[in-house]
Amino acid sequence: MRTRVIEVSVGAFLLVGALALLMLALNVSGLKLADQPQTYKLYARFENIGGLTARSKVTMSGVLIGKVSSISLDPQTLMARVEMDIHENVDFLSTDSSASILTAGLLGEQYIGVTVGAEEEVLKNGDYIEDTQSALVLEELVGKFLFNSVSE
Amino acid sequence: MQMLPLLVRQIYFVGVQSLIIIMVSGLFIGMVLGLQGYTILVDYGSEQAVGQMVALSLVRELAPVVAALLFAGRAGSALTAEIGLMKATEQLASLEMIGVDPLRRIIAPRFWAGFISLPLLAAVFAVVGVWGGAMVGIEWLGIYEGAFWANMQNSVDFSEDVLNGSIKAMVFGFVVTWVAVFQGYDCVPTSEGISQATTRTVVYSSLAVLGLDFVLTALMFGDL
């Protein structure tokens, strides 16, 4: 009888533990059981990326369409080269699309917002988004404001 | 396979019987995190981030570490004392005499039981803690429920956070039980020796857990 109690409670314990892991996966981390969406790579050069990091979001009209996979300094242009993984089903980004670094909220995280242009041709894997707008750096903004008010 | 009943018995002693202390401390730590996080974040008007803060700190750090520390105190010390007393009363020697390997019969099931139990206990700790934080945040402090969970799910990543936290718990389970069974098996077989070995188990495994936690965190999250 005693052995049976032990066996049943150990079984229940293992179940509870597995259930806890499942809760962590589904409820806390919001894991989707579906496959990760297929992606293709796009690049963009920015004058200044501000606080953008790898894993930052890439959005269009506020909808998530990919994420930043890596950031490096391009030695030729001396600009930041941002590599993005864009979901495969977003295959309508025209070649004159523009990418700008935006901030969520006043102090929130930074992300890339993509706006589609008017060209017929679309961006393929490995292409560059040429039209970019850098992050707003508060110090530069304040500097410009001070400079303007002095020159007036 | 004949070791399975022994293993089940040991999981009962180190795992099932640690469940209560793990759940109660998880609940309170989650509730404190929710409360402290709220008082800081409400100054910046971003109290919705409480969920994210509670979940990330629990899953990444507190659940594996605090569960391992409690486990060292609750189960590790008991393992050392038990094995040490077996050695002092010459039960281990008699087992060897009748041709039973004490390493296989006594040490191995206890070691595997700890290795299996701690990751599960850490997961339970994290879940109960998140629930406690949610209870304080949503029910008591009135954070908007949708934003609380959505922020949490957006920021906690399964492979980065949950899996890394589980790996930590596995490493800690390995280290804590290893230290415990070694100290028991290696103790001076007197009453004083057993008491010293039990103390050493708690001290060494706590220090090892905290030190290893830093190393593992640096390896896992250092480049983020």
Image (cartoon, coloured by chain):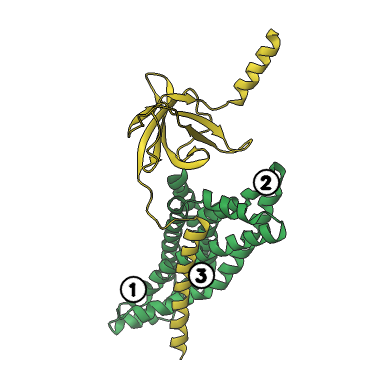
The answer to whether the residue labelled 1 contacts the one labelled 3, judged by CB atoms less than 8 Å apart, is no
> Which chain is home to disc 3?
B
Q: Where is residue B156 drawn, in percent x and y?
A: 51, 51
Which amino acid type corresponds to the residue marked 1 in the rendered image? Leu
> Quick one: SS at disc 3?
helix
Q: Where is residue A72 drawn, in percent x and y?
A: 41, 29
Q: Which residue is mark 2?
A: B41
Quadrant of the image occupied by residue A93:
top left
Residue at screen point 52% across, 31% down = A101
Q: CA distance from mark 2 to mark 3?
A: 39 Å
Q: CA distance from mark 1 to mark 2?
A: 53 Å
- Determine crowd level at label 1: few under 14, some 14-19, many 20+ residues with C-alpha closer than 10 A: some
Q: Where is residue A62 drawn, in percent x and y?
A: 53, 40
Which amino acid type corresponds to the residue marked 3 in the rendered image? Ser
- Do the residues marked 1 and 3 share a common chain? yes
Q: Which mark is residue B103?
A: 1
Whether residue B193 is situated above or below residue A45 in the rendered picture: below
- Mark before the other along the chain sequence, 1 or 2: 2
Chain B display color: green
> Which chain is home to disc 2?
B
Whether residue B118 is situated above or below residue A75 in the rendered picture: below
Q: Is residue B201 visible?
A: no
Q: Name the image quarter holding the C terminus of chain A.
A: top right
Which amino acid type corresponds to the residue marked 2 in the rendered image? Leu
